């Protein structure tokens, strides 16, 4: 029997429904998540299943959404809240960085801080410079936070379930362009541990580390390179913090060559952190300088052609790989 | 200033122009000409036209994601605006900003914003410039009922009142914030009542009555110009479409609205219909004059469409423009 | 509940304990025992004691940087608190949080905060837990006049009122935010009037009158417990010291205050003096009883000091504790 | 004649005074900056010199402080605002990232966005985890922003003057622990260009790149290493964005060995970006993996010994250099 295929957005909803069924401390709040099931449809059907006591539409009050989640988590609930777009995480950074990430510390480890902040991230759909950013590098800089960005329906279900069960605040980033993509997802309960990278393709000539929406473009590039006889290994880290550096190092020790690809702006992106760790821990294995493939250091334009040009595509990934060979 | 017959007829023409602009836009969005999304203000034309008619040429405007009407009412070159929404090089933002990022510095329209409430503090700063330079200007800030629950509303209003800054805050209460109805949005549904918290006047106006809007805004402008500080004008409006063209395209993008509401509002709350009847009653308008005005409006829109459709795509190197001075 | 003579005398003892705790702290800060800084609440003791006396044991407290009084009034173990402020291993936060990061989960004191206004949304979330779990608790949130101008005040209040969350917001209006006097801080200096913006009751109370505080808070707690939702209580207080021990140590750390204000307030607005006179008038207190109570308070502080001074430094490896669960 | 010595905080004030004298579009606003001259004394005397029309104390409204600055900048003023602590930049990230950094882009390059956001950054004075963070890595990730962090009185004067004259938004970070340090500062007008690193010590055996408060510890370490016969070159980048990568590369090509030291948390710090660029552009010159010396990935404790342990000291710098030799 062929495996069931569902979309990324359906996988998100399924994970939440399973976890809400399993644990009645889990509840949702966010803008437009209940009645219409989210601006991007990722929480569709959840209100119908659990009622408005556990699925709450909020006013446009990002600081209250996250701040209330902190208070609810400190008193034993497990909020899963949504900030509609990653760009608007800018509004509630105090609640995320100074409150959620630090509350266990300030209270001598007394409460669990089980809370998930889901957010649609990255670009690709013409929404422009205030609706296309991805700040995983910011969150990864903050002790106390975990940061996850799955690239497939399978991964998003398993990782979101782990995130909801995790006793720490988790920033859960869902690339907006992936919501409509489909893939095989088991109906049953399964989890994927946070902090475990996934080798999405094995290869021996070079390693490509990536996460988020660029992953499928990296996979395409890997196929195109294979046609030219270049055999790349593709590692989707899936979790940004904690980072599965061991998986990356193992691959680099084998291939001796590394490209890191992500969709956020290049300068100050999390790619730099991976480069820094790899060159430190596998210096002698590196046969060429590590290349980064990322968005140009510009703002994201709404024009379709320009946007495609700014975001990293197969072409840049291929060029990156060729540069390390 | 009393509005003359000519003024009123011209205001009618402007309202019709805005309506046609947006209906035309919806058509072309359906055909794939609009990257991302756009938010039409159908049902809110009397607010744009009544408010902008009250402004002096030197006054500034800061607006929101739902701003086409504000620009057209101020006299912005429509082809440039439409080209922008289509993402063309001839657009006011070079095709990089789209519907949410319009501006027209020649008419002191300093910009619209993709962040709900994002303009509120900026408008305060514009007013601060006016105050410091002691010019005879006012800063006018449009925002919505949804924006009124963001923290920036509170911080921006308190400071403006404290420093007696010349700002007129116009809250278009169209009774929805995306899918959230007013009763789930504002604990006190009388938004104008919030003005007392900042010791500033708060007014409530019927947004289907373009003359009432004009008068309320004129009064607040006068007060600001005399050094009396900011005012809040809440204008009740009726959103005759869905939240955005993107959401309207979704199968159940309006499922959250009570059945019959949209039809009822079209019948009873359409400001153009209401104004048209008023002008007929006053003997200012008859079928012939109406046809002439509507034809003039249509001609503007047709010309703009032709211009926008035939405009070139932005040049690749334009991605690097306007990031640093 | 009517306050008995025993209650009142105990409240007097608590107020004296708070005063002595903080005067003692200032002394030891001068001797270099306090890393960073600390904010004493001298002049505000009636608020801590009146409010905490009204609480039921199951109620929660969220507080601010100026919180010693709130903890002591709730019965927190004073040596643990002082040790924390000294940065010792035996402190409630292991010597890592200091004066701004105190908590006592055994008494449902969920934490104080170094971010002005940082607790407001958290308290809303605590109230949300109460509402969802349907327990007989109330979430009590202390903050200052300065915090009342942060956006979180607006977002948190609106949501709490909208959702009828059991929170009592207590604004200690000590007429200064660091160096900023109320008239440069709040456009409308009646902070309690802001409650109408959220359709919640707003009260104003004299913070030198411990019984008035007790009564106002009792009423608001009752209302919250009955499902009536949140209330705002503004309590007028008189800051008898500088903003912080750090600023008090600066040569002109109080230069911003009108001449004679501090002396005048010590003469006429000291809540301990006022309460003491009241108790004398009621015949509940005489010199002998007063001496006994004051001696008891002093003993507690002396013991706490001895404990804190003799406590060990935190262990180096403790830096890794409490960051992730 | 010996050169005049003034403190870092005096150099800040002097730079501002000179620029305010030079250009009457420059003005200040922020919390407690006027009457008392700033929580850390860096704006002392400026109110007296320019009056309250140009030096304004604000309420505790970080979003208004930055948002108003954006509006003022767009209309031709040149605000220099203060966010008292870098930790609280979290509150106004939308205003910084989505507004200030993007307004030129959204308005087709029409306005200059000349504005400076000054903030006290880094730790070292026992204020704990909400008062000791340094987010230069966040800001450096954002196209449209410039980011500066001077380490000496001489540098801060010259760079702040350049920042004020720059037509772009500049995040100007002043390490809190440096305010009291003194050094030679010319009385006359001089500027240091943004984006120009400073070789603070020449050497041939290894390069140490650093910025902020750790710079003086790096210089101490360099002396201690010199005693052991190890000759290091110390480069203080001073500007984080734009980065003077050429200066770094020139040094690395000479020494073949690099250590990057900063005070922010290691993971995701800006050090990673420097590593990524250097290994890419000078791979063949590197004789050893680049080492990073930074704060442990923990929260900053208030206890003095623990804080000293968490922040990078001479010892770690020396270990870092020995690791690359
Ligand atoms: C800070 C922020 N939160 C959420 C959104 C998503 N969003 C865009 S428009 C909108 C509704 C705004 O409602 P309102 O202010 O009433 O304006 P209207 O759309 O009704 O004109 C929302 C939630 C956003 N753009 N910015
Ligand atoms: C968000 C934020 N802004 C600024 C500060 C610096 N700060 C600490 S206490 C304080 C004054 C707070 O005033 P208020 O809320 O009235 O409390 P009070 O100190 O009077 O008790 C300020 C500005 C801070 N800690 N957090
Ligand atoms: Mg609305
Ligand atoms: Mg105060």
Image (cartoon, coloured by chain):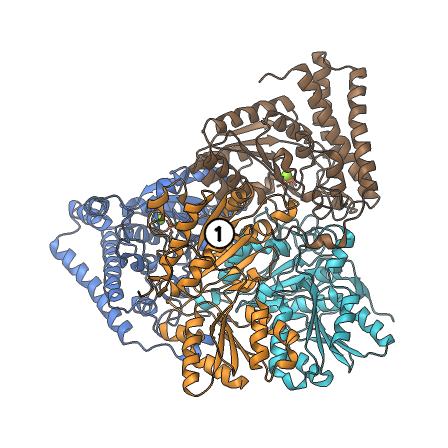
Chain colours: A orange, B blue, C brown, D cyan
- Seen at 13% across and 52% down, the residue is B286
Is C208 on the left-hand or right-hand side of A212?
right
Q: Can you give x and y, in whole percent of width and height, for residue A12 in the image?
A: 40, 56
Count of numbered marks: 1
Q: Is residue C281 above or below residue A260?
A: above
**Observer able to see residue B157:** no
- How packed is label 1: few (under 14 Cα within 10 Å), some, or many (20 or more)? many
Q: Is residue B263 above or below residue D147?
A: above
For the N terminus of chain C, the image quarter is top right
Q: Residue furthest front?
A: A1
Q: Can you give x and y, in whole percent of width and height, for residue A109 in the image?
A: 64, 46
User: Which one is in front, C253 or D141?
Assistant: D141
Q: Label 1 lies in what chain?
A: A
User: Which one is in front, C127 or A5?
Assistant: A5
User: Which one is in front, D18 or D67?
Assistant: D67
Q: Which residue is labeled 1 in the image?
A: A164
Q: Residue furthest bottom?
A: A228
Is B243 on the left-hand or right-hand side of D165?
left
Q: Is residue B65 above or below residue D237?
A: above
- Seen at 58% across and 71% down, the residue is A274
Q: Can you give x and y, in whole percent of width and height, for residue B124 in the image?
A: 49, 52
**Observer able to see residue D154:** yes
Kindly state the secondary structure of the residue where label 1 is placed.
helix
User: Which one is in front, A185 or D74?
Assistant: A185
Is B20 on the left-hand or right-hand side of D201?
left
Q: Residue furthest top?
A: C283
Cβ of mark 1 under 8 A from ligand 1: no
Q: Can you give x and y, in whole percent of width and height, for residue A147 in the image?
A: 53, 60
Q: Is residue D175 above or below residue C263?
A: below
């Amino acid at each position: 029997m062929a495996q069931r295929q569902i979309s990324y957005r359906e996988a998100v909803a399924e994970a939440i429904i399973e976890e809400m069924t399993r644990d009645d401390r889990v509840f949702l709040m966010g803008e437009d998540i209940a009645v219409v099931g989210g601006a991007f449809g990722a929480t569709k059907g959840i209100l119908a299943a659990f009622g408005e006591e556990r699925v709450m539409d909020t006013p446009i009050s990002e600081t209250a959404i996250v701040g209330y989640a902190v208070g609810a988590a400190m008193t034993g609930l497990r909020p899963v809240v949504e900030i509609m777009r990653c760009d608007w995480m800018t509004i509630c950074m105090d609640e995320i960085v100074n409150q959620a990430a630090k509350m266990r510390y300030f209270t001598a480890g007394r409460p669990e801080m089980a809370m998930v902040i889901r957010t649609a991230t990255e670009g690709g759909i013409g929404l422009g410079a205030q609706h296309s950013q991805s700040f995983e590098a910011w969150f990864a800089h903050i002790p106390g936070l975990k940061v996850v960005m799955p690239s497939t329906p399978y991964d998003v279900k398993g990782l979101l379930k782990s995130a909801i069960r995790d006793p720490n605040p988790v920033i859960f980033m869902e690339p907006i362009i992936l919501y409509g993509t489909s893939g095989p997802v088991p109906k049953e309960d399964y989890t994927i541990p946070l902090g475990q990278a996934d080798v999405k393709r094995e290869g021996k000539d070079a390693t490509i580390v990536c996460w988020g929406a660029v992953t499928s473009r990296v996979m395409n590039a890997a196929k195109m390179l294979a046609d030219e006889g270049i055999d790349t290994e593709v590692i989707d880290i899936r979790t940004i913090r904690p980072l599965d550096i061991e998986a990356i190092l193992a691959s680099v020790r084998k291939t001796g060559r590394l490209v890191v690809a992500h969709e956020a702006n290049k300068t100050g992106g999390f790619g730099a952190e991976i480069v820094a760790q790899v060159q430190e821990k596998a210096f002698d294995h590196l046969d060429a300088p590590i290349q980064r493939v990322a968005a140009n250091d510009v703002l994201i334009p709404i024009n379709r052609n320009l946007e495609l040009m700014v975001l990293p595509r197969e072409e840049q990934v291929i060029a990156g790989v060729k540069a390390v060979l | 200033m009393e509005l003359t017959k000519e003024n009123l007829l011209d205001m009618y023409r402007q309202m019709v122009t805005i309506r046609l602009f947006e209906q035309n836009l919806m058509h072309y969005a359906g055909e794939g000409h609009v990257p991302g999304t756009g938010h039409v203000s159908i049902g809110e034309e009397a607010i744009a036209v009544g408010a902008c008619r009250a402004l002096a040429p030197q006054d500034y405007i800061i607006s929101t994601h739902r701003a086409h009407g504000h620009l057209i009412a101020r006299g912005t070159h429509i082809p440039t605006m439409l080209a922008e929404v289509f993402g063309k090089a001839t657009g006011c933002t070079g095709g990089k900003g789209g519907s949410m990022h319009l501006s027209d510095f020649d008419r002191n329209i300093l910009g619209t914003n993709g962040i709900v409430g994002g303009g509120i503090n900026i408008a305060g700063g514009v007013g601060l410039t006016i105050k410091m330079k002691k010019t005879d200007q006012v800063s006018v800030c449009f925002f919505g009922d949804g924006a009124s629950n963001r923290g920036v509303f509170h911080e921006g209003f308190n400071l403006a009142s404290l420093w007696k800054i010349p700002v007129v805050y116009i809250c278009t209460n169209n009774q929805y914030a995306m899918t959230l109805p007013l009763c789930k949005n504002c604990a006190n549904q009388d938004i104008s009542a919030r003005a007392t918290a900042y010791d500033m006047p708060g007014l409530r106006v019927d947004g289907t009555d373009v003359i009432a809007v004009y008068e309320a805004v004129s009064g607040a402008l006068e007060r600001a110009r005399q050094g009396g500080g900011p005012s809040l004008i809440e204008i009740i409006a009726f959103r005759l479409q869905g939240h955005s063209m993107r959401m309207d395209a979704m199968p159940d993008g309006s499922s959250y609205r009570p059945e019959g509401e949209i039809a009822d509002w079209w019948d009873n709350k359409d400001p153009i219909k209401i104004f048209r009847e008023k002008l007929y009653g006053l003997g200012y308008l008859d079928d012939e004059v109406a046809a002439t005005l509507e034809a003039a409006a249509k001609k503007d829109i047709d010309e703009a469409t032709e211009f926008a459709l035939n405009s070139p795509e932005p040049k690749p190197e334009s991605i690097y423009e306007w990031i640093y001075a």
